[in-house]
Amino acid sequence: MQIHGDEKYPASQTLMTSQELGWSNISAELRSHPQGIIASRSAGDTELMLLLRGRSRITREASALRQTHHAAPGMLWLTPADSREELIEISSPLPEALHVFLPATQFSSRVVGGDGYNGDIDRLRYEGGFRDPLLETILRSLLVEMQTPTRYGALLADGLASTLAARLIHKYAGLNCGSSPALSRGRGLDPRRLKRVCEFIDANLGRELHLDQLAQVACLSQYHFARAFKKATGHTVHQYLTMVRLERAKELLAANESSIADIAFRCGFSSHANFTKAFSRSLGISPGRYRRACASSVYLHPAGYYTGSPGLIGDSGTEMLRYSMTPV
């Protein structure tokens, strides 16, 4: 197989490749990336990157979709074959990143069975900064084989390539935008569309999100999307975005690893002041007071003090933080 990294990442250092291992349906490269901006390039094949060492802020842009994530080891980035990235910016050097490339043949019906993957209908999504234990395990298995080749390594790599393609189709393929059966029956967003929109919101909280973008993710007009979303969740899009941003802020405040200003930025608030105002209005306490309460294992509620720990409940992709508490 052709090795793509030298063309797409000309400033990076190649640490290891699978080029001489006889793999026919997949290729892998271990690379070290410097800080900086990578020009517009396309690999030609579907690409997965697994960050192994280093931390950085990675910004990517393709087809007017801009993503910024605070990268940490174990995170993944998916670039479908038909995506042309206008920008990749790395804020700090990444000592080790594993890049795996899958050709279009891996998504054929012969490989995945049934009708296969129809790229004209169910396109893979352009996603970044996510975690998937199964994908990580597959990629790390390829890395081990690349580092210490075995007698049947090519056979193993081919099998992992098929498993990888099946996982991507199952979890990261898009929707058929040509039909809206749930809407025709007067219901809200069907679970698959709702899950996709909620996952998109969760992955892009740090950037400004607009109704037209979310409607496009759901493959609906803005008008129908807004109505169907509220019917499915009980919240307007704006209310839901604010709620999810505040829940993410609570998690970051409890972790006590970032400044309040940085948390405001990472959760998509326009300013520290706007974040503090929204947080205080929602919980009845300031972000700083909430952080101090978490640090002392005492959680606050507008009605009084409680002890306990936060938990998660969810329905149809909507996650809301609740308190598991006993009055003091």
Image (cartoon, helix red, strand yellow):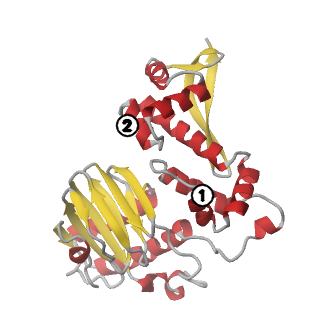
Task: Work out whether 45 lies above or below 87.
Answer: below
Whether pointer 2 and pointer 1 mark residues with C-beta atoms closer than 8 Å, the reply is no
Q: In front: 199, or 171?
A: 199
Residue 287 percent across, percent down from the top left: 48, 26
Asked which secondary structure carries label 1, the reply is helix
Q: Give the side of residue 144 with respect to residue 132, left or right.
A: left
Q: Position of residue 200 (x, y in %)?
A: 53, 57
Residue visible at 33% across and 77% down in the picture? 42
Q: Is residue 7 above or below residue 311?
A: below
Q: Position of residue 75 (x, y in %)?
A: 37, 55
Q: Is residue 127 visible?
A: no
Q: Secondary structure at mark 2?
A: helix
Mark 2 to mark 1: distance in Å?
A: 25 Å
In the rendered view, does 182 fall on the left or right side of 47? right
**Mark 2 Cα within 10 Å, few/some/many (few <14, many 20+)?**
some
Total tally of numbered discs in the picture: 2
Q: Quadrant of residue 23?
A: bottom left
Which amino acid type is marked by label 1?
Val
Q: Position of residue 265 (x, y in %)?
A: 41, 41
Which amino acid is tagged 2?
Asp
Residue that sits furthest to the top in the current view: 328
Q: Return the residue nearer the eye: 51 or 166.
A: 51
Task: Say which residue appears at 30% left-offset and 75% top-offset.
Answer: 41
Disc 2: which residue: 262
Marked residue nearer the N-terminal end (2 or 1) = 1
User: Nearer the observer, disc 2 or disc 1?
Assistant: 2
The residue lying at 22 percent from left, 80 percent from top is 19
What crowding class fits label 1: few (fewer than 14 Cα within 10 Å), some (14-19), or many (20 or more)? many
Residue 197 got which mark?
1
Specify the farthest residue to the right.
185
